Amino acid sequence: MSDPLAEIVSLLKPVPSIAKVVTAGGTWLVERRELGSPFYCAIVEGHCLLTISDQSPITLAAGDFVLVPQIYAFTMSSLQPPPRGTLPQRLETSPGVFRLGDPAAAAEVTALVGHCAFTANDEQLLGSLLPDIVHVQNESRLMDLVRMIHAETVGLRAAREMILTRLLEVLFIDALRSAGNPTISPGLLRGLADSRLAPALRHIHENPGGDISVEELAEAAAMSRSAFFDRFRREVGVPPMEYVTSWRMALAKDMLLRRAAPLIEIAARVGYASASAFNVAFTRSVGMTPGAFARSC
């Protein structure tokens, strides 16, 4: 049986970037803009506020884990942030260890913070399939994984990059599957958490080269066509065939980048009867021909 979540993380290929320990005391605030890279944070002790892209603040407590697959602006602060316009206080006390707020104040918050990158930086795939934010509480496995990633990042041991890559994949999969509930933003995770939609989603991933139709997917979900269409669009965030196209194009991009097969074979693997039909669909979706895409990467 196909595992859509594992397939997507495998396609994105997360790779390590930065891992650091952050402590904070007193009133403090740190702000990042136009970061554009995946961000995760595990709160070891204390409480703080996280505000992402003008959304309502989230109160984080010890044992909380946050993952933001795409992020362009966020702030983290004490529960009572400093007055607007206050200059930030940030000090690197040792390599990879940072202190926020008044250095003379007692440390009230400790967090393990990390950034990574996706080798396949596919904004279309990220935007249509993954939630805006994953917030998981009291999952010891996630906390342990973050600690392992931090220890491996600051160490200089053999096979470090390989181990970090595997740990990041496990972290992403575990975080995403821990967040499969109706409260997250529409996307793949909400769809997989829906007992009716999950079989249809697995069918898409099992057979991307097949002749997929809304009627066939509705049958897999044991629903009428109209009811399935409305429920899929509400829970996944896009109409069924738009999701099918997004997944096919993600697979095609991966094969083009890896030079995995001739164009006609790639076209067949993702459901197109000819290279010309695939060329038209790919250009419409991606904004360039398959050949131009392969040359640009």
Image (tube, rainbow, N blue to C red):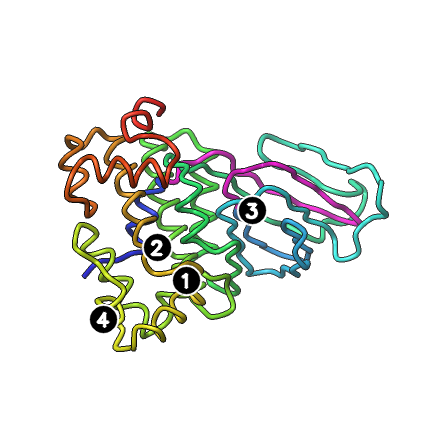
Q: Residues within 10 Å of mark 2 (few under 14, many from 20)?
A: many
Secondary structure at numbered mark 1: helix
Q: Are marks 4 and 3 in contact (CB under 8 Å)?
A: no
Q: Is disc 1 in contact with disc 2, using a CB cutoff of under 8 Å?
A: yes
Q: Which residue is mark 3?
A: 112
Q: Are marks 2 and 3 in contact (CB under 8 Å)?
A: no
Q: Nearer the viewer, mark 1 or mark 3?
A: 1
Q: Answer above or below: position of 118 versus 210.
A: above
Mark 3 Cα-neighbour bin, 10 Å: few <14, some 14–19, many ≥20: many
Residue 204 in percent (x, y) is at: 24, 58
* Frontmost residue, 189 versus 223: 223
Q: How far across and how far down the image is residue 121, in percent?
A: 41, 37
Type of the residue with mark 4? Ala
Identify the residue at image location x=68%, y=48%: 76
Report how far apart the C-alphas of labels 4 and 3 lie in the structure.
43 Å
Residue pointed to by mark 1: 236
Query: Mark 1 or mark 2, which has the lower sequence index?
Result: 1
> Of the residues under marks 2 and 4, which one precedes in the sequence?
4
Please provide the residue range marked out in magenta: 14-39
Q: Quadrant of the C terminus?
A: top left
Q: Is residue 165 above or below residue 183?
A: above
Q: Which residue is mark 4?
A: 220
Q: Along the polypeptide, which appears first: circle 2 or circle 3?
A: 3
What is the number of the mark on residue 243?
2
Q: Position of residue 198 (x, y in %)?
A: 30, 68
